[in-house]
Image (cartoon, coloured by chain):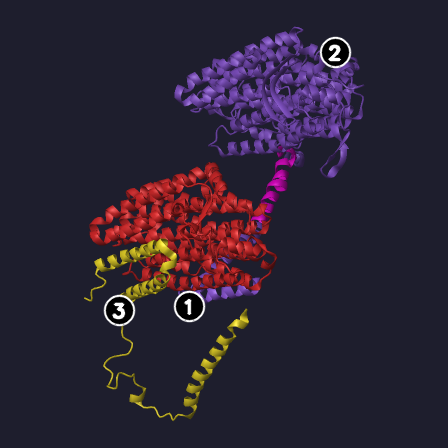
Chain colours: A red, B yellow, C purple
Amino acid sequence: MAVEQLDIHLVLMMPEILVAIMAMALLLLSAWTHKGGAGVIHWLTMMTIVAVVLVIQVGSGTATTFGGQFITDDFSRYVKVVMCLGMVLPVLMSADYIRGHGMDGGEYHVVTMFAMLGGMIMASSGGFLILYLGLELMSLSLYVLAAWRRDDRCSSEAGLKYFVLGSVASGLLLYGISMVYGVTGGTGFAEVASFLGKPEGHGSQLLALGVVMILAGMGFKIAAVPFHMWAPDVYQGAPTPVTAFMSVVPKVAAIAALFRILFDVFPTYHVQWVPILQLFAVLSMAVGAFGGLVQTNIKRLLAYSSIGHVGYMLIGLVANSQAGAQGVLVYITIYLFMTVGVFGLIIAFDRQGLGENISDYQGLARKQPVMAFVMAMFMFSMAGIPPLAGFIGKFSIFMAAVKGGFIPLAVVGVLFSAVGAFYYIRVVKVMYFDQPEGEFKVTLSGGGFIVVSLSLFMIFFWGILPGDLLAWTGASVQAFH
Amino acid sequence: MLEHYFPILVLLGAALAIGGGAMGFSYLVGPKRPYHEKLDQYECGFAPLGRIRMRFDVRFYLIAIIFIVFDIEAAFLFPWAVAFESIGLIGFIEMMLFLSVLLVGYAYVWKKGALEWE
Amino acid sequence: MSANLLILLAPLTGALVAGLLGRRIGSGLAIAATITGMLISAWLSIRVFSVVAVGDGPVIREEIFSWIVAGNFNVHFGILIDRITAIMLIVVSGISTLIHIYSIGYMADDPDEPRFFSYLSLFTFAMLALVTSDNFLQLFFGWEGVGLASYLLIGFWYKKESACNAAIKAFLVNRVGDFGFALGIFAIFMVFGTLDYDRVFQMAGAGEFKPTVDFLFFGDVDTITLICLLLFVGAMGKSAQFLLHTWLPDAMEGPTPVSALIHAATMVTAGVFMVCRASPLFELSETALGVVTVVGAVTAVFAASVGLVQNDIKKVIAYSTCSQLGYMFFSAGVSAYAASMFHLMTHAFFKALLFLSAGAVIHAMHHEQDMRRMGGLAKKIPITYGVMMLGTLALTGFPFLAGFYSKDAILESAYAAHTGLGTFAWIMGMLAAVMTTFYSFRLVFMTFHGKPADHHAYSHAHEAPWSMRGPLLVLAVGAVFAGMIGVPLVGEGWFKGAIVLGQGHDALAHAHHVPFWVKWLPFGAFVVGVYLAWLMYVRLPTLPGIVAETFRGTHRFLVNAWYFDRLYDWMFVTMAKKIGEGLWHTGDETIIDGFGVNGAAKMCTRIAGGLRWVQSGYIYHYAFAMIVGVLVLVTVYT
């Protein structure tokens, strides 16, 4: 095999390479500088991500490399930018949380970067193997992150549970992939798709089994019911910045991978996967709506909230159309800012040793009206109340579902979002109508202030003028169908 | 396609039959007269010094994990060396990249003192 | 900006200045602002009147601005001044100006003077908008505007519970009428596709409409009858006609100038004005005219009968107003619209005069309104006595005073109609005329003659200040001469195109040719009434008690105003409350809350509890759930 026959265009992988090199460099830096280098690493991480975003922006068009195993297109670029934001904003807002909880060795940043790198590879994957590679890189990093506070029982428990269950999920995924390989004789998306396009590619039981397994494996990553059980425990136990990170980036990555699998590989099998995802969506919305009702811990509450949000996103996939795909991207982008904003506030509370219990927010409106207002806005946005951006997200999803003929699904979604609104608004009620207990003053750190105000701005801005967001996401999903 | 796996099925069946047969037969025919020492844990013939369920030092795990990493590296190196002629310069560069990534980890582990038994 | 528009805008400006800046600039300037506005408006009205009504000027039509444009619904805000409007203009702005001036003295002690004057001017603006309208929607705007002002002014002393209740009552009863009125306007738009008077009347005259429409569960009904009856329901509410009259006596809770302006001279006549204005429609429906006649005639007798036994000086005049409005309606019902308008005008003068004189009496007696506690006041306040006597004579139709001309025109028209209903109305009108004279002179005798009942109040009684006396004198002049001057109104064709008469509807034209005894019978009624009143309240002061005792049932029936308030209270208030409570307890609490809201919430909590139980925290449970999930998917979907 001669060199010139190899299809290697490293330039397409520049963002990933940049992240990998910088992560390794920072790892070495952290080993050699001890604690003194933490600040430097923090800012170098920021700059790296900014650089990565810029590099991503340089690319254009659709191209593949490594024999089609690695794809860059508008979609992957959009998703990668979202992931970069999902990584950099939690890090930015939690600089002093990291310091305060002994997480400032610098490795935290490195492992986060590795997790993101895994996600980016998933988004660009052109075959099942590289998809699995990215998934494992991301997952392993996340296990470590979840258990980062070794001295904390909850954190260790979170890491362990995540790891064990994640391994089961990975096993399911691999099993599914092997079945697909067994039937089609390939692992590249293009190969599998071309095989399925032929007459003999239809109606294979084994392949259907493989699809189910793959969906189960991916469902675990996005915490779709019934593969969601880990989420509340892990969200609660993991350090708050990690929770913020993992409620966005892994979901974005897994959803992106699902886009590729469903739309590029198995479009002809949609009779198969649409009902499954429909089931996932309904169950997720239900569990997300009802599960949150009785929670007292806000991180646990947000875990159920994220399960619910995943349910809505899945509706967009079920719609099996460009509008649906666009709705998912819109939703996930808005979801990013809402989630990051709320976690920013929780971290601000954590600075006072508070903030995990919903009762800690009692009477916040009297003591700190601005803080309470901001929190209330995030909650209303999560509940999908106009004119905040959360409404736009739900609206585009439901519109896509209705256009795709999934009217009952949209109705169910609206009903569950009404149930779910209860617990978001309960937080508002606690802040505004309950008597305050104890004296404290919650302040945001500098980074926290930037992140929270940016998030607040975005949910208002996109709530009122969603035009740009719709245009970008619309352009990004042109590749599908 | 499945018929190619038939020998494996035969092998599996034979293994199960032999293993299960031996254990089942001895269970059936062997005399059973248990007493304390007989049921105690086996420790090279002398009386046991401590409880059997003791914690291993975490350093064993560290060493084991690092060993596995380098073990796999070796496992990669063998086929690479065999096929070196045909994969040429690109193969060489790729292996060097792989090794340098491992080297970064190795350096980190070393610097962090994970290799010292103290 | 045209001078005609200024007629409307001047009072509005005054109202805004007094209302918004009243506290800032003080009551003196606020009053000055409103009165200036009124003077401008009155002067311009007189000018317009002299052009349109006295001279032979053309009808003024102006489009001010495009108001609502929605599809084929197109309404503009406009001004239409023909001879009907001209008369209304002079009545409204003239009397309003006088009452503004009168209020300076009457309201002098009140701390909320700017608010009062602001409301008065606001009322005037709305009333002027009503009468100058050239389409039904603007009419409705003014209609609701005067209703609002009436509500605000009845409840002006909002700290008094009775005043607040009266205000709410007035508003609610008017709502019933306005509902019909609004439906009528909808029907007009539905049938004619426009709300402009000119277009509607022209199309109606030419017969360009569907003869029947399907209305609710009544099936197909005659289009014009339906429209007219619905409009008339509105008129019944606003003009306090029988069945919807209950709010007017209670409205006397407001300050007396308000009673004079709104509940005697102007607002309550809006219904009459509207019927006259819509004469081209009413003329097309004998049924509607019949209903108008009967309702008017019944109201005339009913209100007069209740007025016989009232002791509150203002209530007597209020029932009198109600009764006189009945005259105006049955006159319109026999197609003598001109007589209606004529009586409307003269009535505005003498009734405002009566109210203001009553106000002067109340003022003199330190806010005492019960006539039984008055008496012999003629000596203490001779000027008030004089003007009140003039007003009473004008009302009772003493020869050559205002009421003599207008009331006689009405009664003669009713007689000359030569229809069953016309004769009925004529008999009722005569009956009411006797009673009118009786209660009017009863009022005068009880208040000004005899012996003072309350010596303390009597000794402190004093003549009103000049700001109050001035308007009284001006109105007295009006009460004397308005009839004489206004006679041409009932002449043939004075209103030109503003009033349209149907074929054979010539009661008014024949009114001059009625027999001699018909012409002089009203005077006979006057004499009888005066004699009875003199007999009972001057000659034999014990007689009323004896009569009341003898006809106890009748007396109680009258004192309680035919038990209408109690009937309505039982029929609507109690029933509505019962229905409301039923809906509240069974409908809302048990069904909606129990099964819907709380039931759903309870179910949610139960589901959530179940989910919490599933979320045990054990890894193997979680893994088990995953495996079960996969198995289910595999079995179901492959």
> Where residue A222 sits: x, y (%)?
44, 55
Q: Which residue is mark 1?
A: C620
Compute the Cα span from label 1 to label 2: 105 Å
Judged left or right of residue A295, residue A443 is: left
Mark 1 or 2, which is nearer the eye? Answer: 1
Q: Which residue is mark 3?
A: B60
Q: Is residue A165 above or below residue B36?
A: above
Magenta span covers which residues?
C557-584
Q: In percent of the image, x 29 and y 84: which residue is there?
A: B42
Crowd rating for badge 3 (residues with CA inside 10 Å; few <14, some 14–19, many 20+)? few
> Where residue A251 sits: x, y (%)?
43, 52
Kindly indicate whether the residues beneath marks 1 and 2 are on one polypeptide chain. Answer: yes
Picture quarter containing residue A158? bottom left
Subunit of mark 1?
C
Mark 3 or 1, which is nearer the eye? Answer: 3
Say whether disc 1 or disc 2 marks the residue closer to the N-terminus: 2
Subunit of mark 3?
B
Amino acid at pointer 1: Tyr
Kindly indicate whether the residues beneath marks 2 and 3 are on one polypeptide chain. Answer: no
Q: Which residue is mark 2?
A: C492
Element class at badge 3:
helix
